[in-house]
Image (spheres, coloured by chain):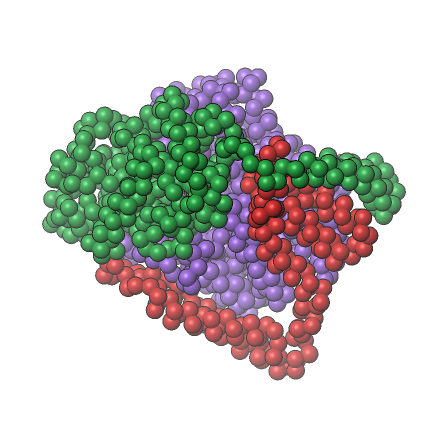
């Protein structure tokens, strides 16, 4: 079956009134759920499963993948407006999105987020349709040692995040890595640095820390030093300065392209996903950027990198699901369960015997990613209205969203305390110019880094050299070493020059 | 001594303590030649200790240069408003367990709005009521997220409310 | 919610200054809210303390793992049937974290009135043996019923070194510790069962723990590990497609779906441990309520739709059902059995 037939098959599946209607609803609800902190993308998909009983199996998965894509995009809305990541995958979006909003450019930020998301989603959907087989084989090549190298590559950005305050950024990142080790040891299965608290056995939860560091600390800062966030009339289409000029869009083309490819690949990797993808995309773009010093202060490139990569990961994560039947993440696991309820076994035969699944998901994702721009813009407008509320109501409201967001995933009130503590820590770090962003980077990548290193060493029977010299691993680690050292060397050289002058 | 310096020294001390503690509380690796539970944290702690030491030296040098004038003072860093805000947050995270979501959220929003500068009692009550009910409707009723129910009579109130929808 | 949108809308329409706008909204809101509050209080107060026959309201099932996990899907399949049997809403709550412990601690804090069911697995028994939490399954909960029992299936990738169990045993005997096997938590049920199987077979395996079933399977298919500890439902499609071989199943009888896979008994390994999923409620719940719950769960279990779900999920391969009394005995047996296993395996 050639690509054209595949495509027509998919269009036949999706363009029935009922499925199309469901996809539209899925889009709307997905964006809203994603924008509400505390409802992760996988939870959004799980909430939608009962609706699939009205659809046939192919329609169901097309519908659920639409919800998934939309939820990941929706997470960017509160990230820009309130510095609360709606889903963990949009934590990186806060780095540049919120500074833009403070400057009164939330409309521009929102546009960049939506268009980047759509580009990332569509490119990865195309990759899924055309080279699914090859991609899933590529994904399987990444064993523990390769994944360790990928995580290292993400960490290598630590030295270039803020070149003026390299030591402080390093301390922040190392603290994040250290906090990630306070948990049940992944290999020996013994409590490590938990000081007897069973709460810590699962590790310090990532979502409350992120929300606390970003949103709560921001509210605390506003309480003592109110700075009016300019509410941006995003709706005002007449004022063209709110829009991006063609030049500005054109400037972002390489960022979107690179991050689409990266996000798709990371999405395929076992154990990674949209969150890690956005951190890696951001790290990579910082290396390529002409103005890396703008990252974290409202760079459109940074914003685009984050959202392109996390949406590209959605297409990527469908690859192992459809070609092998292995769900790459929680959301995919929910989709498998939903299909099973309809009596469909997901496995490698599915793609060979029923290509409609692949093409159906593809068409649904493309439709979703285009529709989403408009749907999410509408939802964003509704959310932007909240900005008009006077701060004596908005401040507590942000804390409420943050608390429910921290609480909801584990139904655990200790998580709310963790969030408050993280808010305090985040405030102190920001006051002294340490980097909360670096800390979350360490926290997110710490587990995947350590676990895969130790797995790799175990598989190699304790032979470190054999593990690290595997071709992909060695290549990635070499790149990582160069990235780590480059800013340091540049700085020393600059220092020498200054000393000579 | 500046706040930043004290924090740096405290984290340095804690890191050194943890370096010892993690080795003392985890067993050696179960297979010869592979990493034990303590190895990875220790690797990070070494990096942390080095980075902190460099930073402390830098801070000391800067404070000597500027004679402590530039460093942030306690008062500046933690003004009374900040302390009150933080206490309200901590109190909220504690009473959630006992009073349940709606009552504790109501109290929290009132306290926090008042702190930010709202003085009218009627506005305080209404604002708190609207925002807590709005969040309750969105999460508990529409999304079926189980919000904290509280204990005793508060629990019964929460369960009664849930029964209505 | 309504007031809220109204206030936002109002802001948009009027174009006076913000202070006046706020005033106008507030006044409008005041009346409505006051009426609502009084009304709800009037309805609520007489209801407090009123006793009704069980169940008077909805029941929560606490699932200590995330959406899409095995326990989660089982409970979501059971919930609609349980709803029919009890006549009240049944809501599944995910409280994941710390390998199932956070959910257990959350459930244990609920009152002993029968309105909270806790979905548990051998993981919680193992946690009790290791003293991982101050809450323990046997001391803080009462068993209601066990629903399903799964089997352990040992698989190998087709591109890997081993096609059969015997081939693997032979190689492992010659090269102790060189055969790697992927599984989940290092002291969880699959690690313990795998180590017991290896011990009984007289070989030494290198158990590599992975973060999730998908990660473990990718490592197996990519040839990074030799074997994986799996379950029938999650491997049948890959085995059928010829991507994996099923080497051994830890049961006493061959599974209908894997007619060519030898059992552990055939290989002289007398181990049939496998993960199971059950329901418990909080200790102190009156016995008549527990009996009612057990009866309802049994009805839901026997329903056509749940039986079909079990069949699709290949959980019908071994008898799973156990009532409250039987499950109580099973808990005690498992505690004794796994404590012993931990000692013997030196965990």
Residue at 71% x, 55% y is B112
Asked where in the image residue C130 lies, by quadrant, the reply is bottom left
Give the tally of numbered discs. 0
Q: Is residue B82 left or right of residue C161?
A: right
Q: Which of A412/A479 is in front? A: A412
Q: Position of residue A16 (x, y in %)?
A: 54, 17
Give the color of chain C as drawn: green
Q: Position of residue A410 (x, y in %)?
A: 50, 46
Q: Is residue B3 above or below residue A372?
A: below
Q: Is residue C203 above or below residue A63?
A: below
Q: Position of residue C119 (x, y in %)?
A: 40, 39
Q: Position of residue C154 (x, y in %)?
A: 23, 39
Q: Is residue C18 left or right of residue A294?
A: right
Residue at 80% x, 51% y is B121
Q: Is residue C93 above or below residue A227?
A: above
Residue at 38% x, 21% y is C304
Asked where in the image residue A355 lies, by quadrant, the reply is top left
Residue at 50% x, 70% y is B11
Give the color of chain A as drawn: purple
Q: Is residue B159 left or right of residue A469?
A: right
Q: Which chain is red?
A: B
What is the quadrant of the C terminus of chain B in the image? top right
Looking at the image, can residue A301 be seen?
no
Q: Which of A180/A254 is in front? A: A180
């Amino acid at each position: 079956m050639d690509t054209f037939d595949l495509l027509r098959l998919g269009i036949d599946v999706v363009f029935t009134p009922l499925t199309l209607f469901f996809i539209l609803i899925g889009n709307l609800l997905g964006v809203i759920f994603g924008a509400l902190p505390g409802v992760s993308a996988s939870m959004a998909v799980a909430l939608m499963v009962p609706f699939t009983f009205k659809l046939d199996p192919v329609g169901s998965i097309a519908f659920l993948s639409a919800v998934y894509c939309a939820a990941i995009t929706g997470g960017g809305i509160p990230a820009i407006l309130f510095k609360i990541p709606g889903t963990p995958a949009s934590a990186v979006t806060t780095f540049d999105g919120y500074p833009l909003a403070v400057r009164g450019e939330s409309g521009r930020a929102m546009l960049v987020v939506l268009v980047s998301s759509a580009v990332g989603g569509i490119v990865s959907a195309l990759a899924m349709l055309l080279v699914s087989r090859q991609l899933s084989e590529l994904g399987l090549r990444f064993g523990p040692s390769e994944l360790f190298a990928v995580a290292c590559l993400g960490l290598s950005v630590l030295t270039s995040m803020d070149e003026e305050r390299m030591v402080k950024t390093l301390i922040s990142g190392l603290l994040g890595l250290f906090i990630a080790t306070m948990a049940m040891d992944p290999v020996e299965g013994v409590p490590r640095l938990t000081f007897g608290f069973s709460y810590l056995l699962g590790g310090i939860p990532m979502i409350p820390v992120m929300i606390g560091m970003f949103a709560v600390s921001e509210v605390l800062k506003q309480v003592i030093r109110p700075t009016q966030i300019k509410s941006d009339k995003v709706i005002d289409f007449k004022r063209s300065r709110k829009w991006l000029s063609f030049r500005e869009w054109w400037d972002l083309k390489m960022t979107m392209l690179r991050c689409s490819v990266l996000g798709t690949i990371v999405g395929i990797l076992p154990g990674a996903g949209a969150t890690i993808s956005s951190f890696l995309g951001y790290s990579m773009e910082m290396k390529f950027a002409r103005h890396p010093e703008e990252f974290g202060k409202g760079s459109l490139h940074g914003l685009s990198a984050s959202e392109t990569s996390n949406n590209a990961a959605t297409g990527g994560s469908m690859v192992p699901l459809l070609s092998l039947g292995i769900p790459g993440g929680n959301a995919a696991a929910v989709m498998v369960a939903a299909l099973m309820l309809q009596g469909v076994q997901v496995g490698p035969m599915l793609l060979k015997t029923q290509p409609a699944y692949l093409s159906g998901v593809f068409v649904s994702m493309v439709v979703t990613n285009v529709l989403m721009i408009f749907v999410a813009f509408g939802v964003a407008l509704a959310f932007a209205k909240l900005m008009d509320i006077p701060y004596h109501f908005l401040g507590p409201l942000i804390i409420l969203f943050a608390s429910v967001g921290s609480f909801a995933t584990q139904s655990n009130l200790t998580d709310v305390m963790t969030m408050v503590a993280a808010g305090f820590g985040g405030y102190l770090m920001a006051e002294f110019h340490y980097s909360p962003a670096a800390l979350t980077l360490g926290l997110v990548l710490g587990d995947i880094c350590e676990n895969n290193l130790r797995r790799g060493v175990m598989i190699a029977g304790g032979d470190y050299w054999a593990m690290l010299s595997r071709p992909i691993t060695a290549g990635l680690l070499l790149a990582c070493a160069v990235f780590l050292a480059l800013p340091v060397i540049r700085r020393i050289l600059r220092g020498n020059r200054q000393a000579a002058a | 001594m500046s706040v930043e310096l004290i924090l740096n020294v405290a984290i340095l001390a804690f890191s050194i303590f943890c370096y010892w503690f993690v080795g003392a509380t985890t067993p050696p690796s179960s297979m010869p030649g592979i990493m034990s539970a303590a190895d990875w944290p220790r690797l990070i702690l070494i990096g942390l200790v080095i980075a902190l030491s460099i930073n402390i030296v830098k801070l000391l040098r800067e404070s000597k240069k500027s004679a402590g004038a530039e460093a942030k003072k306690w008062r500046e860093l933690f003004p009374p408003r900040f302390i009150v805000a933080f206490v309200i947050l901590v109190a909220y995270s504690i009473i959630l367990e006992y009073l349940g979501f709606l009552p504790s959220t109501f109290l929290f929003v009132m306290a926090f709005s008042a702190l930010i500068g709202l003085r009218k009692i009627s506005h305080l009550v209404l604002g708190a009521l609207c925002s807590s009910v709005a969040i309750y409707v969105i999460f508990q009723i529409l999304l079926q997220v189980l919000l904290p129910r509280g204990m005793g009579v508060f629990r019964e109130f929460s369960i009664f409310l849930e029964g209505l929808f | 919610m309504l007031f809220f949108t109204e206030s936002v809308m109002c802001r948009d329409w009027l174009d006076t200054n913000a202070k006046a706008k706020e005033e106008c909204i507030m006044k409008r809101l005041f009346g409505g809210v006051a009426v609502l509050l009084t009304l709800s209080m009037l309805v609520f107060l007489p209801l407090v303390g009123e006793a009704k026959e069980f169940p008077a309201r909805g029941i929560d099932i606490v699932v200590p793992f995330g959406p899409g996990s095995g326990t989660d899907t089982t409970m979501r399949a059971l919930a609609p049937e349980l709803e029919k049997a009890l006549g009240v809403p049944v809501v599944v709550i995910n409280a994941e974290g710390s390998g199932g412990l956070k959910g257990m601690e959350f459930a244990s804090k609920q009152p002993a009135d029968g309105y909270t069911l806790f979905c548990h697995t051998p993981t919680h028994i193992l946690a009790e043996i290791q003293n991982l939490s101050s809450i323990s399954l046997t001391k803080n909960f009462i068993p209601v019923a066990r629903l399903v029992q799964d089997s352990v299936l040992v698989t190998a990738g087709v591109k890997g070194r081993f096609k059969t169990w015997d081939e693997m045993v032979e190689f492992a005997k010659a090269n102790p510790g060189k055969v790697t096997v992927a599984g989940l938590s290092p002291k969880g049920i699959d690690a313990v069962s795998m180590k017991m199987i290896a011990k009984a077979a007289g070989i030494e395996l290198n158990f590599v723990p992975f973060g999730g079933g998908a990660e473990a399977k990718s490592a197996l298919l990519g040839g990074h590990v030799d074997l994986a500890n799996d379950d029938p439902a999650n491997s049948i499609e890959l085995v059928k497609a010829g991507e994996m071989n099923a080497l051994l199943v830890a049961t006493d009888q061959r599974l209908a779906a894997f007619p060519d896979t030898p059992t552990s008994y055939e290989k002289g390994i007398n181990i049939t441990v496998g993960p199971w999923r059950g329901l418990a409620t909080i200790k102190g719940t009156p016995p008549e309520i527990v009996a009612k719950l057990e009866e309802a769960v049994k009805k839901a279990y026997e329903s056509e739709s749940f039986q079909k779900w079990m069949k699709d999920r290949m959980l019908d391969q071994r008898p799973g059902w156990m009532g409250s009394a039987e499950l109580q005995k099973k808990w005690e047996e498992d505690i004794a059995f796994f404590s012993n296993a931990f000692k013997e395996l030196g965990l």
